[in-house]
Structures are given as C-alpha cells and as structure tokens.
Amino acid sequence: MTDTQAAQIRPGRRAMARILRGILVGTVRRATSDRRALPAFVVIGAQRAGTTTLWRWLLAHPQVLPPVLDSKGVHWFDLDAHRPPWWYRAHFPLRSTLARRTPSAVSGEASPYYLFHPRAPEMAAATLPDTRFVVLLRDPVSRAVSHYHHMRDEGNEPLDTLEAALAAEPGRLEGAEAALLADPSAVHQHHLHHAYAARGRYAQQLERWFAAVGRDRVLVLDAGRMRSEPDALMAEICSFIGIDPALAASPSPGVNAGHYAPPDPAVVTTLRASYAEDDERLWALLGERWW
C-alpha cells in the first residue's frame, strides 16, 4: 500500500459521534446487552436508492422499533467493525420492551453501506443467523449521478464535474477492498464516499450477500416501485420481515431527494455502456429486468 492510499484510511466525518456513542454504549448499556434483541431485519442498501424513505415508512409501522441510540443505522458491519458483538446488540431494544410494545414487535436498522462493503456479508452471517435483509436497487446511472451530487452537497467531493470524478474513481479505489478486509478498524474515505460507478455494479455485491447469508434471506426490490406501487412494495417488505402488512401506514412522499442539473449526455452514455455486462449478470441473478 502506498503512502497516498494509506492516507485515505482514516476516520470519517462522523468519527467523533461514533466515539461518543461508543463511550455511552460501553458505560451505560453493556450490562444489559445480553437482554437485547438482535434486529429482525436490516436494510443494507443501496445508497441513494430510497433507503431513508423506506426506513421512515418502516418506522411508521406500530410493530417496528428503531435502534435505541441511532435514528437509522448502527454501521457495525462497516464503520465500527472493530467493536465487539455486545456493542452491536447494545444498540437495540430490550426483549421486554419489544414484548410490551406488541407480542410481534421487531427491531431493525438501515445502513446502506453494508451492501457495498466487502466485510459486511460475512460479519452479518456470523452475527445474525435469523435476520432478514432488504435491498433497494436503483438504475445505476441515476444512482451514480445522485451520489455524486450528494457528495458535492455534503462537501465530500472536491472535483467539480461528474466526468472528472468518474475518471478519478479507479485510482481512488485502488487497494481499498484489500485494506478494508485486512483491518476491521479501517475507514477508507474514497471507498465510502467516491465509489460512484462501483456501487452500481450490483451483481457482485448481491452474490457476496447471497453466498454469505442465503438467497432466501435477502429481498431485492426495484426502487422504482416506491413511486409506481408504494403500497404493494411496503406490503411485500412487511410480509418478508414478519410484520403485519395490514398495519402499515400509507407511504409518505420520498425524502432526501437531490436537485441538480441534468448530467452531460455523453457522460451518461459512457456510464450506461460500462454497466452493460454487469446488468446482464444482475438480470440473470434476479430473473427479471428493471431498467
């Protein structure tokens, strides 16, 4: 690994929040971790595919409780993988709390980096033997464009065009997966923030998850259905994770949507062509086409 690559493996912007949260978990909640329920479901991605909106829909269901110390995701399988298993369990409600809510209440989390992170599938398989995993997939070209503008809005992308960011991506990601697999405490900033094209190569990511936890425990859905048939989509998810579809609230409008100028058509054409082989692999894996 070069010095430049090593410099990219450093704490992210939310590192301090994770440290403070870790102190709270360690001093206050460790003693009760063995009485806490592991999540019944985890939304694992994809980033910029509607996971925040889906999470809000799920939280509106009376049988769903969020992680106690987080509004959405715990990120143990990616950003905090160096912490012990009790740390992860300590984030979830007590089993007695779930029982008081309703006999069929469940907890869950949503961390969309899990789908892309190379370590996450094996960690999840070892820790969550009965958990169900939900994946939303968005047209990879639209996802990449949205991702780039989201990083620009957050101040995490210095390059001022999508074309420049895509050209820089191979160099930025060089050695990232090997480094992340080698060190559970590593956070590779380019892998986390700048994998615009790579995160849309869904087939490889799904194959890793299917191999680790089993195809039957992963529900893969077309994110486009959140607009075209949100009630049917929500009912399918509820049935999959074991909660009553009849109790689901009517889905609310999407959140976290980006607003930006249309991308350069030439860049879109090039990006679309780069996905052709992977998309065919994806359709073979899923048995249907979505875009």
Image: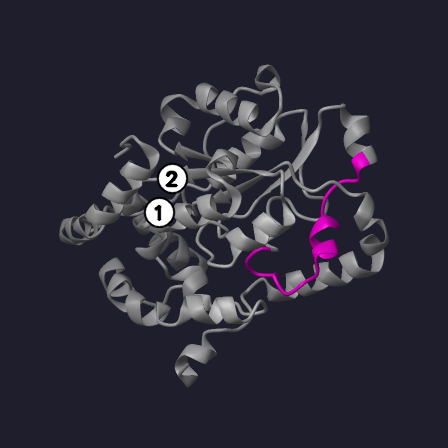
* Apparent side of residue 85 relative to residue 186 in the rendered image (left or right): right
**At label 2, which amino acid type do we have?**
Leu
Above or below, 171 against 224 in this view is: below
Residue 156 visible in the current orientation: no
Placement of the C terminus among the 4 image quadrants: top left
Q: Give the foreground label among 2 and 1.
A: 1
- Residue 41 position within the rendered picture, expressed as x and y whole percent measured from the top left: 59, 37
- Residue 143 position within the rendered picture, expressed as x and y whole percent measured from the top left: 33, 46
Residue sitting nearer the eye, 133 or 267:
133
Q: Which residue is mark 1?
A: 202
In the figure, residue 197 lies in which quadrant? bottom left
Above or below, 218 against 148 in this view is: above
Q: Which mark is residue 137?
A: 2
Q: Who comes first in sequence, dot 2 or dot 1? A: 2
**At label 1, which amino acid type do we have?**
Tyr
- Look at 30% across and 41% down and name the residue there: 282
Q: Which residues are magenta?
A: 77-95
* Apparent side of residue 186 relative to residue 223 in the rendered image (left or right): right
Q: Which mark is residue 266?
A: none
